[in-house]
Image (cartoon, helix red, strand yellow):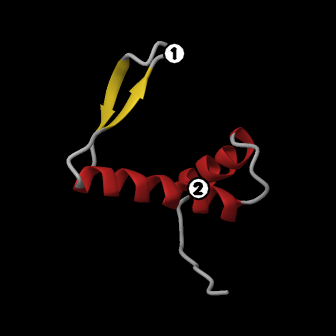
Amino acid sequence: MPRVSFDVNEQFQEDFEKLVELTNSTSKAEVFRRAIALLKIATEAHAKGEKLMIADENRKPITEIVLP
């Protein structure tokens, strides 16, 4: 299986470790795979002219996530 390695700053490392805890993930690799999957979904939707939104419990849009 291919490996990926990159350098990060201290804040990124802290945020990454916190995401492992908050998402009940078993590893940093799992968080990374989930993040890539979400970015892939968002990018594909954006390419089709669709929007990625955060909605409240009533499905009312609160904010749009805009990709560069």
In the image, farthest residue toward the right:
26
Name which residue type carries label 1: Glu
Give the SS element for disc 2. helix
- Image coordinates for residue 60, horizontal then vertical, percent: 38, 16
Lateral position of residue 27 relative to residue 39, left or right: right
Q: Earlier in the sequence, mark 1 or mark 2?
A: 2
Lateral position of residue 34 relative to residue 67, left or right: right
Q: Rounded to the nearest whole Å, what is the CA distance between mark 1 and mark 2?
A: 23 Å
Location of residue 19 by image quarter: top right
Q: Which mark is residue 57?
A: 1
Q: Would residue 33 be seen by someone viewing this image from the given angle?
A: yes
- Image coordinates for residue 30, horizontal then vertical, percent: 68, 60
Q: Is residue 24 above or below residue 56?
A: below
Q: Is residue 9 above or below residue 4?
A: above
Q: Which residue occupies 69% across, 42% down?
A: 23
Dot 2 corresponds to which residue? 34
Q: Nearer the viewer, residue 18 or 27?
A: 27
